[in-house]
Image (spheres, helix red, strand yellow):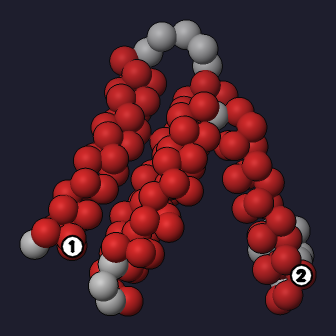
Amino acid sequence: MADGIKGWARLIRATRVSYWGLGWAIREEEAFRIEAALCLLLLPLALWLGHSGVQRAMLVLSLFVVLIVELLNTAVEVVVDRIGTERHVLSGRAKDLGSAAVHLALVQVPVVWGLVLFG
């Protein structure tokens, strides 16, 4: 590791940086805030509607997938913007692909919930 941090110190630092990233996404990314709010609203419902631990886990994990993919999409957008602000077909494609990933993550929520609750 480049900075020489090992063991528990590395884990603590990685956790701190992760929370910093989450905080940044909450402060700066409206899409993440909206999705996080919806997840917070749906989380108790998922725990209540699931009839087993596996069902509850599937319902909750489907919500977490949305947040994870949104964070990755935001990371792609930040990196593309860091490289340059001029229009480039590959920059646009990278952002479009990230957006498509978020869309699929959002679509999978009602699919998973429908299969778990009505399948």
Q: Is residue 23 left or right of residue 29?
A: right
Is residue 98 shown above or below 14?
above
Under mark 1, the amino acid is Val
Q: Is residue 30 visible?
A: yes
Q: Position of residue 50 (x, y in %)?
A: 33, 78
Q: Residue at x 77, y 60 (%)?
A: 19
Q: Residue at x 50, y 67 (%)?
A: 44
Residue 28: image location, x then y, percent: 71, 33
Q: Nearer the viewer, residue 68 or 114?
A: 114
Dot 2 falls on a residue whose secondary structure is helix
The residue at 73%/62% (across/down) is: 18
| Quadrant occupied by the N terminus | bottom right
Q: Is residue 29 left or right of residue 8?
A: left
Instruction: Using the image, tell me which numbered label, if any, was put on residue 76.
Output: none
Compared with residue 53, is residue 44 higher up or lower down, i.e. above or below? above
Q: Secondary structure at mark 1?
A: helix
The amino acid on which the numbered mark 2 sits, given as a three-letter code, is Ala
Q: Residue at x 83, y 89 (%)?
A: 7
Q: Residue furthest left?
A: 119
Query: Disc 1 marks which residue?
Result: 116
Q: Which residue is mark 2?
A: 9
